[in-house]
Image (spheres, rainbow, N blue to C red):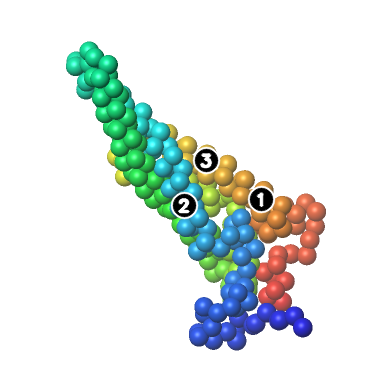
């Protein structure tokens, strides 16, 4: 006999870490972006960002370290075969060390800003849903979950990209012209990434707010799921 999913209202505090069924009763991962819950999506994004930053930092750091070593030793080129051997051995050491150090730095920086972006995106999703909830006077966990699901679209992602780029520009004290270009780029990247997320969400069957709006007004419909559940 198949197990029934427990009612969220009947879940006791002692069962918080139990069973997968309890977690699914409290939250449906299918409502999240890319069908990945935020507590899992954030560390996953951080890991991917750190790995990407490490690869970029290793390449860039090694290149810069090699050029620096050549510049610092341009006035004392070796004259013997043994001297050239030691020269290249020392150069390889500096290249490896510079690459590893830059890999750690780049991994930390990229991981930090990706974490800011993902957190800001989730916060905007929930903030927009909260405003709609207050405006409509919606009450109840299921109705609120529907609102949050419908608010997860490219708008939040674009604003998160814009906000992250603005914070990055402020942190690095960019000139106004550079900051404007950075913010524009952040908004464009956020918009593109948000549209890609929405396409994946629609293909996976997740409700996207503006898509449902277009369906209701162009193809007809029975109203939003929030209204239906409230009735």
Tell whether label 2 touches label 3 (CB within 8 Å): no
Name the residue rendered at 24%, 14% in the picture.
Answer: 80
For residue 47, the mark is 2
Name the residue rendered at 33%, 35% in the picture.
Answer: 96
Front-most of residues 98 and 171: 98
* Residue 171 locus on image (x, y percent): 31, 45
Mark 2 crowdedness (10 Å alpha carbons): few <14, some 14-19, many ≥20? some
Q: Earlier in the sequence, mark 2 or mark 1?
A: 2
* Residue 71 locus on image (x, y percent): 25, 20
Quadrant housing residue 34: bottom right
Quadrant housing residue 78: top left
Quadrant where the N terminus is found in the figure = bottom right
Tell whether label 3 touches label 1 (CB within 8 Å): no
Q: Which residue is mark 1?
A: 200
Name the residue rendered at 78%, 65% in the picture.
Answer: 222
Mark 1 crowdedness (10 Å alpha carbons): few <14, some 14-19, many ≥20? some
- Please indicate whether residue 110 sits to the left or right of residue 172 in the image: right
Q: Is residue 72 above or below residue 110?
A: above
Q: Nearer the viewer, mark 1 or mark 3?
A: 1
Quadrant housing residue 8: bottom right
Q: Is residue 191 above or below residue 29?
A: above
Q: Secondary structure at mark 3?
A: helix
Q: Which residue is mark 3?
A: 189
Q: Earlier in the sequence, mark 3 or mark 2?
A: 2
Q: Nearer the viewer, mark 2 or mark 1?
A: 2
Alpha-carbon distance for marks 3 and 2?
20 Å
- Please indicate whether residue 140 sits to the left or right of residue 56 in the image: right
For residue 22, the mark is none
Q: Secondary structure at mark 2?
A: helix
Q: How many marks?
A: 3
Alpha-carbon distance for marks 1 and 3?
17 Å
Quick check: can you spot residue 88? yes
């Amino acid at each position: 006999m198949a197990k029934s999913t427990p009612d969220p209202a009947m879940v006791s505090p002692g069962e918080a870490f139990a069973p997968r069924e309890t977690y699914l009763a409290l939250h449906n991962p299918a409502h999240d972006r890319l069908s990945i819950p935020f507590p899992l999506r954030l560390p996953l994004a951080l890991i991917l960002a750190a790995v990407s930053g490490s690869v970029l930092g290793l390449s860039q750091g090694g290149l810069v370290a090699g050029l620096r070593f050549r510049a610092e030793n341009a006035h004392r080129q070796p004259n013997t075969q043994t001297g050239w051997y030691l020269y290249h051995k020392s150069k390889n050491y500096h290249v490896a060390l510079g690459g590893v150090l830059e890999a750690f730095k780049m991994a930390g920086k990229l991981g930090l800003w990706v974490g800011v972006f993902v957190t800001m995106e989730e916060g905007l999703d929930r903030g927009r849903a909260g405003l709609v909830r207050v405006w409509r006077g919606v009450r109840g966990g299921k109705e609120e979950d529907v609102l949050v699901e419908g608010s997860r679209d490219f708008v939040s992602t674009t604003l998160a990209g814009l906000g992250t780029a603005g914070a990055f520009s402020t942190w690095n004290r960019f000139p106004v012209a550079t900051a404007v270009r950075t913010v524009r780029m952040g908004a464009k990247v956020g918009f593109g990434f948000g549209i890609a997320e929405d396409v994946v969400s629609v293909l996976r069957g997740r409700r996207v707010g503006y898509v449902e709006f277009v369906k209701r007004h162009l193809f007809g419909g029975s109203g939003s799921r929030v209204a239906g559940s409230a009735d």
